[in-house]
Every structure is written in structure tokens, then in C-alpha cells.
Image (cartoon, helix red, strand yellow):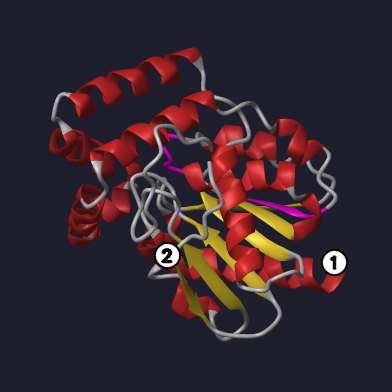
Amino acid sequence: MAQQSLHSTEFGQGEKIIVLLHGFPESKDVWRRLTPLLQEDFRVLCPDLPGAGNSPFEGAQLSVEDMARALADTLQDKGIHQPIVLAGHSMGGYVALAFADLFPEMLAGLSLVHSSCHSDSEEKILNRRKSIRLLEKGGKEVFVREMIPNLFGAAAKEKAPDLIQEQIKRGMDMPVQSMIRFYEAMIARPDRCRVLEQAPFPVQIIAGKEDNLIPVKESMAQARLPNRSFVSALAAGHMGMLETPQQVADDLRQFARYCFETA
């Protein structure tokens, strides 16, 4: 993949920088409830990954490593050379782990938000390939409308159905080819638990007690891998930054302050 600078939005200012990476099928807008809560304390950068939102991608293949390198290019283009705190949601966490693997010196801290250091299981690979076939046959709307509600916990389904419908609408904005490339990138990604085990920086694990994709037990096990770890267990599903934004912001703020003080 050729050098690419990602389209991004910025909030706040200063030398303490938090970068938020969205998941699938999302764009930078998935952080819309979180950025107002962080921008007074940090400069917050929200990129669109290649093929999402306003970041184009015309290549035939895409990997999590390609996306990590695109983030490094973006930081360089913005003149950001100091270590950042990098937080990634779900697929964004896979990209964040690849970034930590490739550019550990660029990190003051790593936050995995409803994400995993493990590679896909055989069952998950089969399910992703099934979804790819559905997408190739024109089933994007069916795919999005079935997938998105399953990402949310019971409270959101009961009290915030409009939030879920909004996310369905935003998910529909992602091109089919981008969805397929992202799924193929997730299938191909390696296990990166050693990155957590060897991390020279603090690691944060944010989990959802009702997460159907990343079980909370798996997240708690991951939290034992790094030398320095922060753990949050939310009363939420897979979308804590939308379901419980205040708690996610508070936990991320505490983590980032520690990272920048000890970097």
C-alpha cells in the first residue's frame, strides 16, 4: 500500500494527544459522544481508516498493518513526533495492536476498547467468509440491519433505540468493497498477544459486560498480560463509547493522564 495520509478531525489542543481509531462498520463519527468529554484535557485526533468515512482506498487488498502504517504517515504529516495514547475500538484495536507492534516508540499508552489481541478462531473466520459472500451478493442492508443491533447491550436496546437506528444508518454509508476489505484484513491478522506481554507502555482494557463479540472473560484475561494494565468493565455491550460515553471518557482520561505523566 502506497503512503496515505488519513482524513481526520481534531478536537482540543496541546501536546498530550489521544488518537481514537474506529471499528467496523464505522467511521470516525463513532466517537462523537466521547470527543466533547476529552477535548478540554487533550488534543484528540479521530481518523477515518482507509475505505471508511472520508479516507479513500482504491487498492485491491488491505491489511491491519497497512492501516497502521497509514496512521504513522498521518501523524508524520501533522508534525506529531511525541508519543501518543492510542485507543482502538474492535477492528480499530486490531490496527492499534499492529501500530504498537510496528512503532512501539510512538506510544505512551495503548487502549483496547472492546477488542482482542487474539487472531480469529476458525468459527469466526467461517462466519466472516459467510458475511463476505452475503455482501458480494448484494446483501449489505440485510447484513448491517442484523449486525448492528447485536452490538448493543440490553439497556441501549430498551432506552435508546434511536441510537441504534442512527448507527445502522451510518453503517449503511460504508461501501461494500470497504466492508469486504476490512473483513479480509481481520481474517488475515495474526495473534498479537505478545505485544501486550512485551509492552513497554501501559495498556488499558475496556470491556462490556454484555459484549456479544468480545466476552468480558476474554478481556479480563488479556488484562493480565501487560506489566502495567488498567481495566474497565462497563454496563454495556460492544459499543461503550456510545452506550456509556461518560464512563469511557472518565476511564480513558485517567489512563491517558497516567501515561503522559510516566512516559
Question: Left of 129 or right of it: where is 89?
Answer: right
Nearest the eye: 159 or 172: 172
Name the amino acid, label 2: Trp
The magenta region covers 201-213
- Pointer 2: what residue? 31
Nearer the N terminus, badge 2 or badge 1? 2
In the image, residue 115 sits, relative to residue 189, either above or below, namely: below
**Image quadrant of residue 77?**
bottom right
Estimate how packed mark 1 is, as few (under 14), some (14 to 19) or many (20 or more) residues with alpha carbons within 10 Å: some
- Residue 207 position in % (x across, y down): 54, 47
- Pointer 1: what residue? 263
The C terminus is located in which quarter?
bottom right
Q: CA distance from mark 2 to mark 1?
A: 25 Å
Nearest the eye: 167 or 233: 167
Estimate how packed mark 2 is, as few (under 14), some (14 to 19) or many (20 or more) residues with alpha carbons within 10 Å: some
**Residue at the (42%, 42%) spot, across then down:** 210
Residue 145: mark: none
In the image, residue 154 sits, relative to residue 194, either above or below, namely: below
Name the amino acid, label 1: Ala
Whether residue 225 is visible here, answered yes or no, is no
**Residue at the (79%, 43%) spot, across then down:** 226
Whether residue 142 is visible here, answered yes or no, is yes
> Dot 1: what SS?
loop
